[in-house]
Image (cartoon, rainbow, N blue to C red):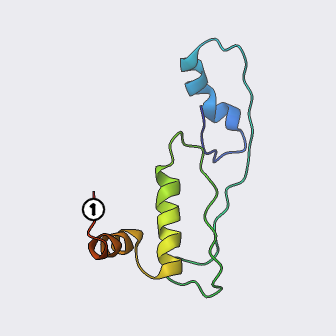
Amino acid sequence: MSSIIEDPDYEKDLKPALDLLGTRLESFAQITDLYQSVDQEGDLKSNVHITRSFDPQSHFENDIDDILSTYKNIVGESFEDVYQRWAKENNVKPE
């Protein structure tokens, strides 16, 4: 189980979920900070492009969105637009 904690007493916050899981052989906790750039999207005065920290979700949907946003900030257009143009120029049917 993973979560983003918002309270220093994370054990109290997680207790209802842990109770649902029942008996566990082992439990451990690791707390790490999440980071993100101080520049706002579209206002990248520093010209330094840094993705956010990976979040604790079990899939990478948010991370992919962040990477695609960073790509757009660097290149100036979306990956989808670049791919569509490349596909047209190379007679490749986009999926």
Tally of marks: 1
Please tell me in which quadrant of the rendered image residue 39 appears: bottom right
Location of the C terminus by quadrant is bottom left
Q: In the current view of this chain or complex, which residue is farthest to the bottom?
A: 45
Residue occupying image coordinates x 61% and y 52%: 54
Element on which disc 1 rests: loop
Residue occupying image coordinates x 61% and y 62%: 52
Within 10 Å of disc 1 (Cα), the crowding (few <14, some 14-19, many 20+) is: few
Apparent side of residue 29 relative to residue 76 in the rendered image (left or right)? right
Q: Position of residue 46 (x, y in %)?
A: 66, 85
Q: In the current view of this chain or complex, which residue is farthest to the front?
A: 90
Apparent side of residue 23 relative to residue 75 in the rendered image (left or right)? right
Apparent side of residue 3 relative to residue 11 in the rendered image (left or right)? left
Viewer-closest of 87 and 31: 87
Q: Is residue 54 above or below residue 68?
A: above
Location of the N terminus by quadrant is top right
Q: Position of residue 4 (x, y in %)?
A: 61, 45
Report the residue marked by disc 1. 94
Q: Which three-letter amino acid code belongs to the residue tagged 1?
A: Pro
Q: Position of residue 7 (x, y in %)?
A: 67, 45
Residue occupying image coordinates x 36% and y 68%: 80
Q: Is residue 81 above or below residue 22?
A: below
Viewer-closest of 75 and 10: 75
Residue occupying image coordinates x 56% and y 26%: 17
Viewer-closest of 11 and 60: 60
